[in-house]
Amino acid sequence: MFKSKLFLSTLFGAAMAMMATQASAETLRLLTWGGYAPEKVVEMFKAETGISVEVTNSNNEEMISKLRATGGAGFDLAQPSQDRISGAQAEYDIYKPINLSKIDASLMIASMLEGTKANTMYNGKVYGVPHVWGTSALTVNTTKAPDIKDYIDLCNPKYAGKVSYRMKRPTLIAFAFSMGMDPFAAYNDKAAYQKILDKVEAKLISCKSNVKAYWSGGDALINLIRSGEIIAAMAWDGSGWKVNAEMPAVKTIAPTSGALGWIDTFALPKKTKAEDAAYKWINFVMRPKIAAMITEAAGNFTAARNGDAAVEESKRMRFQETFPAAAIDNIKWYPPVPAGLEDMEGKVMDRVKAAK
C-alpha cells in the first residue's frame, strides 16, 4: 500500500514537472536573412535560455508583405534593413518601438547604434537597432593605382578605360559625397537634391572615358579585376576581400569621404508574442564570439563591438585593414528614401548612359 502511494505520488510529481516545463517552454519566431541565425547559434541559445528559435528566411520585400498581411502578427522579431522601417511603419503600422533599456548597448559599436536609431525613428520613437552590415567602398589594385583614395579619383584621366562602377543610385550618392556635398541632408528638399544630381551627372558624363564597363554582378566585377582589365572600382567590400586572398595587391579601401553603408536591423513586429525572448536573442547574438559565428555563416560583419576578434584570422585582418575605428565612424549609412527621389535618380542615370 505504501509503495503504491509512493508510486502514485512520484508519477503525479513527474506529470506536474512535465506540465510546468511545457508551460514555460517558449519559441521565438524569427523573420530574418539567410545566414543570420546559424543552426549552432540557435542550439547554443536554447541551451542557455530554454527558448527555441523558429527561423524563417526572407528579404525586405517579403518581410513587409508578410507583416502587412497580418497587421504585424506571426513573428516575434524581424530583420529589415534600416532604410525600410520608418516608411513601412508610417504606411502599414506593422512594428512596435524598441525598448532601448532592454538592449545591452555596450555590446554594440556606438556609431552604428546611434546611426540606426536615427534612421529608424518614426514619430520620435526608435524602431530598430543594428545587426549585420556591409558597404560599398573601393576595390583597388594598389600597385597599379596607388593614389586612388576616394570615389572621385576613379575619374583621374590616367586611368582611362581601367575603372568600373555600377550605374545605380549608390554611385550617384557616393560621387556626391566625394565631391564635397551631402545628398542625404537634401533628401527632403527635391530642388536641392536635383542640384546635387545635376553636378554628379556632369561628373559622371565627363568620367565615361575612364569606365571599362558598368558592372552589374559581383562575379563579373571580380573577373574584370582578376584579368587586369580594370584596376579600380566602386564595389561591395566583400569583392575586394575575396580577390585579395589570391591577389594581395588588390585591396578594399574605405574612401576618404566615407564608405556607403547598409545595416540589417532587429525590429519588433507589432503583435510579437515573445518580446522578452526577442531582447534575449538580440543581446545573445551581439556577444563577440557569437557575432563571429554569424559573420562566418553570413559573410558579413556585425555591429557587435569586437565582433571581428574571433573571426578567422585572414578575414579579420582584411576587415581591420579596411575599417579601422575611424573608417567605421565615417561610414555614411543609408537613411530612408523619400518618395520621388528614385525617379529623379533614374532620369540622371538614363542621361549618363545615353551620353557620348
Image: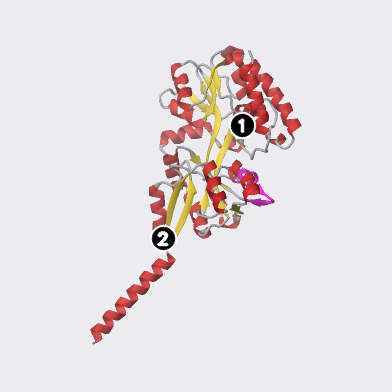
Residue 37 position (above or below residue 215): below
Could you say whether the residue bearing mark 2 is in a helix, strand or loop? loop
Residue found 62% across the figure and 17% down from its top: 354
Horizontal and vertical percent position of residue 107: 53, 49
The colour scheme used to paint the residues is secondary structure
Residue 133 position (above or below residue 284): above
Horizontal and vertical percent position of residue 14: 33, 73
Horizontal and vertical percent position of residue 315: 44, 34
Q: Which residues make up the magenta segment?
A: 113-126
Number of residues whose C-alpha sits closer than 10 Å to that of mark 2, classed few (under 14), some (14–19) or many (20 or more) = some
Horizontal and vertical percent position of residue 318: 47, 32
- Residue linked to disc 1: 258
Number of residues whose C-alpha sits closer than 10 Å to that of mark 1, classed few (under 14), some (14–19) or many (20 or more) = many
- Is there CB contact under 8 Å for labels 1 and 2? no
Residue 337 appears left or right of 190? left
User: Which residue is more in the foreground, 244 or 146?
Assistant: 244
Residue found 54% across the figure and 41% down from its top: 61
